[in-house]
Image (tube, coloured by chain):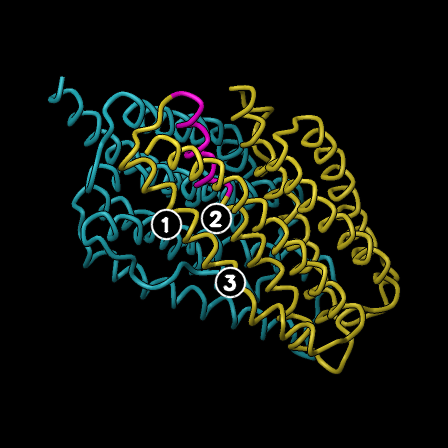
Chain colours: A yellow, B cyan
């Protein structure tokens, strides 16, 4: 019975790492659909989101069962509670990829993004995917150093996000307000996705070290 | 010992209800600072946010202690896990009020909002505060009917939010792109605040009834 318990506990981290990979794929496809005006890819992200929601429910159910039946303490308890938090963050990352895909679909076959800002989103997409993949590594290896690398990428994301606004707010912005609205929301989706990836990694560092590194991004 | 346990368990709901009232006050002041160009009010919201963060940490610490020391089961376990979720939602609501206040401060003494959209934000602010107050009632009375009323208000919020975009996207929008960017983000902050209020209420309904009403808003 205790052996099955430890298997389920380790299984939680694996399930969360799988979720990281799911949301990485979702954001990769969503970004490609946005930049390449690829409706089929956008549709895939939209229809696959239920799988991410189901994965979150499954992690929560496992965590709940462990709490109810096995009364974990100390580090084990931290693992279970952190898993509940991480599953919530990951579901939200899936939702944010979904929002990107829905924006691409809404404007199809028109491009959402003027050429001028496409490189920003290519880079924000690349960073977002890399961060979700790193979060997966943090979960599988409980590696606090990879978690630190994730913080650096989050700073790069914030930097891109800020710069994007400078471009939008420039006096000579030649595009319609509708494009500015889309770009504003899209920028926010990528930035929030990155924040949640950091939050997942920080929870794991907390499990490993017993201390939360800094406060969560707002 | 068991009596102290039940006191702490009941105390969790009270602490969360207090948090609802804190974030209601934060959003009320943030909206007033936005509409009335009141820098002092904006500063209050900004400096009070640490109290909301502290309240969240305190709820989490209590929940963790209950899990570690008292091994709650069945409904009690649902209360504890739901409290952890609700505290996270409420901290986020505080962050969103903070973002509104920071936007008001950033543009001060200029108005953030053109006159044309001020009524939207007055109404979104009113709804947001009413929803946080209702969430407090749901927590104190475990009242599923009040939770249902909250869903109706969330629909009204979504409606306002959608309509705001129609105004922004209209061909005859006379203002600068910078204003459109601010309005887009502000609209999103209110809409997400409302989503989190619904999520808090749904968690409590889950505690009372054992079933989650619908899926969480994305």
Judging from the image, mark 3 belongs to the subunit labelled A
Element type at mark 2: helix
Mark 2 crowd level (few <14, some 14–19, many ≥20, 10 Å Cα): many
* Residue bearing the label numbered 3: A51
Q: Are marks 2 and 1 in contact (CB under 8 Å)?
A: yes
Identify the image quadrant of the C terminus of chain A. top right
Q: CA distance from mark 1 to mark 3?
A: 34 Å
Q: Nearer the viewer, mark 1 or mark 3?
A: 3
Element type at mark 1: helix
Q: Is residue B183 above or below residue A134?
A: below
Element type at mark 3: helix
The span shown in magenta is A74-86
Q: Name the image quarter holding residue A157.
A: top right
Residue B129 got which mark?
A: 1
Residue at 73 percent of width and 69 percent of height: A177
Mark 3 crowd level (few <14, some 14–19, many ≥20, 10 Å Cα): some
Judging from the image, mark 1 belongs to the subunit labelled B
Q: Name the image quarter holding residue B187.
A: bottom right
Report x, y in % for residue B30: 49, 43
Report x, y in % for residue A45: 62, 68
* Residue bearing the label numbered 2: B31
Query: Is A77 a magenta residue?
Result: yes
Q: Nearer the viewer, mark 2 or mark 3?
A: 3
Query: Is A103 a magenta residue?
Result: no
Mark 1 crowd level (few <14, some 14–19, many ≥20, 10 Å Cα): many
Residue at 54 percent of width and 43 percent of height: A14
């Amino acid at each position: 019975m205790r052996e099955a318990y430890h298997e389920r506990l380790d299984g939680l981290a694996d399930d969360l790492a799988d979720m990281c990979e799911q949301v990485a794929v979702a954001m990769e496809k969503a970004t490609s659909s946005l930049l390449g005006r690829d409706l089929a890819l956008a549709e895939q992200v939209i229809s696959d989101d239920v799988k991410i929601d189901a994965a979150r429910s499954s992690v929560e159910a496992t965590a709940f069962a462990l709490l109810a039946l096995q009364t974990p303490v100390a580090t084990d308890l931290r693992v279970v509670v952190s898993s509940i938090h991480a599953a919530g963050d990951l579901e939200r990352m899936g939702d944010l990829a979904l929002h990107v895909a829905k924006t691409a679909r809404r404007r199809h076959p028109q491009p959402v993004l003027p050429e001028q800002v496409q490189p920003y989103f290519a880079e924000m997409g690349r960073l977002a995917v890399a961060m979700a993949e790193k979060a997966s590594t943090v979960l599988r290896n409980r590696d606090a150093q990879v978690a630190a690398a994730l913080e650096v990428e989050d700073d790069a994301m914030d930097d891109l996000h800020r710069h994007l606004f400078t471009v939008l707010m420039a006096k000579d912005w030649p595009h319609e307000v509708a494009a500015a609205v889309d770009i504003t929301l899209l920028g926010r989706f990528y930035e929030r996705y990155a924040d949640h990836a950091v939050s997942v990694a920080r929870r794991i560092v907390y499990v490993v070290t017993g201390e939360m590194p800094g406060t969560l991004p707002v």
